[in-house]
Image: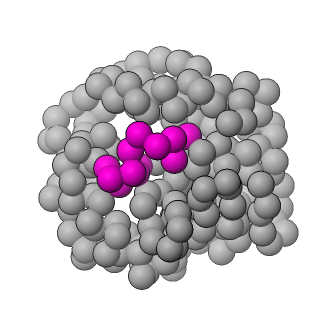
Amino acid sequence: MSMAYSTQSRHSIAASTCPILQTRRLKLRPQRLSDAGSIAQALSDFEVTRMLTRVPAPYHRQDALEWLILRTVGTSPDWDFAITCGDDTLIGVVSIEKRNQEWHLGYWLDRAHWGHGYMTEAVAAALGRFFEKMPGDVLHSGVFADNPASLRVQEKLGFHITGCHEVYATPRSTMVTHIDTAVTAKTFRAW
C-alpha cells in the first residue's frame, strides 16, 4: 500500500494532514465540498442511514454541505476519508475521530457497492495507517445488533466485542442495541 502524508506529532492527527491511502482497488482521500452530492445520494437511502447513529433521516444535500463545511473549518484531530474507486467519486466514508479522550472508528458505504469487500479493504487501510502513527492506542467502534455484515468486517480485522448497550439512533428515532468493539495494534489483522 503506498501512502502520502504530512509529518505530524505522534499524539495528534490533524484534519489538514489527512493522508491519501491507496489500496489494490480503492483510493481513500480527504473529503471535499464537491462530495456533497454523492454523500447526500448515498445517505438518502434509509438502508444505509438506519445503521448510523447520528445521521438525520431524511438526508439532504444541504446536510452534507453543512457537515463538510464543519469538517473543513474545524480544528478537529480527525481523519475523514472519502472511499473512492475508479473515477474518484465518493462511494463511502471511513472516519477516525477522538471523542471523550478515546479514538472511534465509523464507516458507511453506498448500498450499490455492498457485497464486494470494499469496506473491509477501506477500513483495513485506515487502521493500518492509524496504528502506524498511534501504535499504543485503542480504537473503539461497534455496530447495531441488527447489522451482522458490519460486525463481520470488524471481526475479520481483529476487533473484539467489549460490551453492549442501548443508544439513540437518530435515523430510526428510537433506542437500538449497540455492540461495542475495540482493536489494538496487537490484535489488528491486516486484510
Picture layout, residue 39 above or below residue 93: below
Front-lying residue, 22 or 13: 22
Which quarter of the figure has residue 27? bottom right
Percent across and percent down for residue 120 are 55, 40
> Which residue occupies 19% across, 49% down?
46
Front-lying residue, 16 or 40: 40
Q: What number of labels is visible? A: 0
Decide if residue 130 is in sight here: no
Percent across and percent down for residue 174 are 16, 35
Percent across and percent down for residue 42 are 30, 60
> Is residue 16 toward the left or the right of residue 136 in the image?
left
Front-lying residue, 187 or 109: 109
Picture layout, residue 160 above or below residue 184: above
Decide if residue 124 is in sight here: yes
Q: Which residues are magenta?
A: 108-120
Percent across and percent down for residue 56 are 22, 56
> Which residue occupies 53% across, 54% down?
95
Q: Is residue 126 rendered magenta in the image?
A: no
Front-lying residue, 88 or 42: 88
